[in-house]
Image (tube, grey):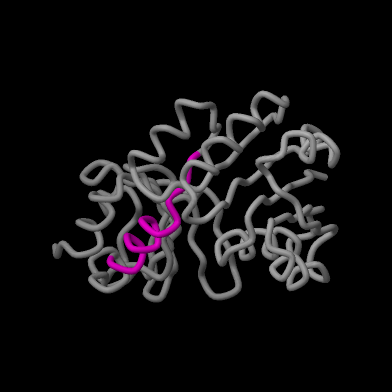
Amino acid sequence: MKQFAVIGLGRFGTSVAMTLSKMGYQVFATDIDEERVNDIVEHVTHAVTLDALDEHALKSIGIRNFDVVVVAIGKEVQASILVTVMLKELGVNKVVAKAQSELHGKVLERVGADKVIFPERDMGIKVASALVSKNVMDQISLSPEYSLVEMVAPPKLVNKSLEKSGARQNYGITVLAIRRGGEMIISPNASQVIEEGDILVVIGKTERLQYFDTVEV
């Protein structure tokens, strides 16, 4: 089972730590603020008050032994960068770092972060997409260009096979699964007919998904 460490227990860090814990993973959580640590101690495997800028403190908790370390330090950009550098120097296999801006993200990548995430930006994209969407139920940004979307089958697709729908040919979109009532159709073939009320799980370029959701036939 993967072991995670979360450094920084603001709203984002706390949410990540508690969600991973609820999913059954072992989670070590730490923050320099003792009150934040006390608030989460009962919800994770282990939580301690620690200054992540103290290299000896990081070594003492065996930070390199965790499969993934999430740097969720809030507004202190310099601290998040320095901690990321130290984690890689200490031999952490995968460091996921939270960025406040595109520039901050580029610096984190340059200093060794294996994955950079933009919680505020990505949430803004998700909310905006939901506001203008007719059918999208949920959206996950996989990269700046691609998204995974769960959507109610648009009326223009009902009673058409996937092949005839033009999803792949015209929009470059792949239907990964169809949820129909309590049934889940995984990797549907080209002849699969879409029915009214079907929930489609699709992947593709974000801009194409938005167009696919709104265009009429």
Tell me where residue 46 sits by quadrant: bottom right
Depth check: give the residue in front, 158 or 199.
199
Q: Position of residue 184 (x, y in %)?
A: 58, 62
Q: In the rendered view, would you say 196 is above or below 116? A: below
Name the dominant secondary structure of the magenta segment: helix
Depth check: give the residue in front, 135 or 162.
135
Residue 127, magenta (yes or no): yes
Residue 214, magenta (yes or no): no
Depth check: give the residue in front, 26 or 91.
91
Q: Position of residue 185 (x, y in %)?
A: 55, 58
Q: Relative to 6, is 57 on the left or the right?
A: right
> Which residue is painted at 51% across and 70% down in the image?
180
> Which residue is painted at 50% across and 48% down in the image?
98
Q: Position of residue 199 (x, y in %)?
A: 44, 68
> Which residue is painted at 46% across and 45% down in the image?
77
The quadrant in which the C terminus is found is: bottom left
Residue range highlighted in magenta: 116-128
Q: Position of residue 181 (x, y in %)?
A: 54, 75
